[in-house]
């Protein structure tokens, strides 16, 4: 962790602008927060700032309002949940910049928390507009980034404002960089990566960067179809990325050359449609019907993958093994999640849908680390520099 954190900077009495990622899932009917794990993850930073008498100014985006005010995407319910978790009042503003917001900031006392309105109500946020960034920076003396989930995006609140203030990491950002960084620099071996999800294209950079570091690479989910097709198997109506087949074949051969093993499913669940009514059928990998789609890994694959994973000391998992949203096609994913929760190994779960799955199954606390960043964790593990990290002060 080569970046300064809130421990390395004077914050008592200072106005501290904290960028968080409270883009939490909401119940479409009631507007209630359906999963507050992203808020919980930032509590250590919040408590430290409050205890050290900072004037805390919180900012985040929520949803995709595309530069317009959307009533259902206001931050008030999020601020209320933060208030409950912090056990102290959290005041809100009707905008995130401007004279009224500046007045509200002037009124906060050391140890108080003020929550700004949704950053993305302004199109200038995603455009990384410099005058918008300056207006945000004007509110504070110090900038703290604890939004790992948006660190791969060069927005006004993640990159722009940090150019005008001393910028340091919060504790969540520090933890993410340390844990994910250890996968690239010093994982305990044997080290296995288990990758799923729909598209190979989303994971190519990650696979290329970790192939030389893992002892084993297991491929499931929709992306397995492209690898199977590249090896000459019939994959029926499964979605494949035609332009990635050569790449898939090259990755298989690179894994072979590196002495690392890349394992594909040996059996699969197929269905005639991807719908709640559809019934799954287990078939061997060389027996996929031309009129059906792959919807999950099969029981033999679950056993094979489980046996291999149990032998490892470090496990990284990103991407479901099947169509998780449909209960009968979530069996493989759930089996893998339960296995990881039972291990004594270091278990690291990539963000996005994989994090949502372990949260929903109430297994997150049984994992070593569940990342709060989907796209950010993938980009980081590809070996890329994240814009939101690059702007922070070096130690």
Image (cartoon, grey):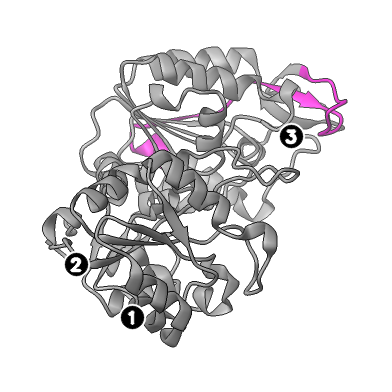
**At which x and y percent is residue 391?**
28, 70
Using the rendered image of the protein, determine whether residue 49 is visible from the camera's viewpoint: yes
Q: Tell me the magenta residue range.
A: 254-281
Q: Identify the image quadrant of residue 165.
A: bottom left
Q: Is residue 287 above or below residue 303?
A: below
Q: Which mark is residue 138?
A: 1
- Contact between marks 3 and 2 (CB within 8 A): the answer is no
Q: Which mark is residue 393?
A: 2
Residue drawn at (41%, 19%) of the image: 309
Q: Is residue 167 above or below residue 209?
A: below
For mark 3, what is the residue?
235
**At which x and y percent is residue 235?**
74, 34
Q: Secondary structure at mark 3?
A: loop
Along the horizontal axis of the image, is 136 left or right of 28? Answer: left
Whichever of labels 3 and 2 marks the residue nearer the N terminus, that label is 3
Name, please, the residue furthest toward the bottom: 131
Q: Residues within 10 Å of mark 2 (few under 14, many from 20)?
A: some
Nearest the viewer among 54 and 389 is: 54
């Amino acid at each position: 962790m080569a970046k300064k954190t809130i421990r390395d900077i004077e914050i008592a009495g200072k106005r501290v602008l904290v960028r968080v990622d409270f883009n939490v899932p909401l119940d479409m009917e009631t507007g209630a927060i359906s999963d507050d794990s992203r808020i919980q993850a930032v509590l250590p930073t919040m408590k430290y700032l409050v205890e050290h008498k900072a004037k805390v100014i919180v900012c985040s985006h929520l949803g995709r309002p595309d530069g317009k005010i959307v009533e259902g995407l206001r931050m008030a319910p999020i601020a209320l949940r933060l208030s409950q978790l912090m056990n102290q009042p959290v005041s809100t503003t009707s905008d995130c910049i401007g004279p009224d917001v500046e007045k509200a900031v002037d009124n906060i006392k050391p140890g108080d928390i003020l929550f700004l309105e949704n950053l993305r109500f302004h199109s200038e946020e995603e455009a990384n507009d410099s005058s918008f960034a300056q207006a945000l920076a004007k509110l504070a003396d110090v900038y703290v980034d604890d939004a790992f989930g948006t660190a791969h995006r060069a927005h006004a609140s993640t990159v722009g404002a940090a150019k005008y203030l001393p910028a340091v990491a919060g504790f969540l950002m520090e933890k993410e960089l340390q844990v994910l960084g250890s996968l690239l620099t010093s994982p305990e071996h044997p080290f296995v990566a288990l990758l799923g999800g729909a598209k190979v294209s989303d994971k190519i950079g990650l696979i290329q960067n970790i192939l030389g570091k893992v002892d084993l690479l297991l491929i499931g989910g929709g992306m397995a179809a492209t690898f199977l097709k590249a090896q000459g198997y019939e994959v029926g109506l499964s979605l494949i990325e035609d332009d990635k087949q050569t790449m898939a074949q090259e990755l298989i051969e690179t894994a072979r050359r590196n002495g690392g093993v890349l394992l594909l499913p040996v059996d699969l669940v197929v269905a005639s449609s991807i719908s709640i009514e559809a019934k799954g059928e287990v078939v061997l990998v060389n027996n996929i019907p031309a009129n059906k789609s792959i919807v999950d890994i099969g029981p033999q694959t679950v056993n094979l993958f489980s046996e291999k994973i149990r032998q490892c000391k470090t496990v990284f998992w990103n991407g479901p093994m099947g169509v998780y949203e449909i209960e009968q096609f979530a069996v493989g994913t759930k089996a893998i999640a339960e296995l990881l929760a039972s291990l004594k190994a270091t278990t690291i779960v990539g963000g996005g849908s994989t994090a949502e799955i372990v949260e929903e199954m109430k297994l997150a606390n049984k994992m070593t680390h569940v990342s709060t960043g989907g796209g950010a964790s993938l980009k980081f593990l590809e070996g890329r520099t994240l814009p939101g990290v690059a702007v922070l002060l070096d130690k």
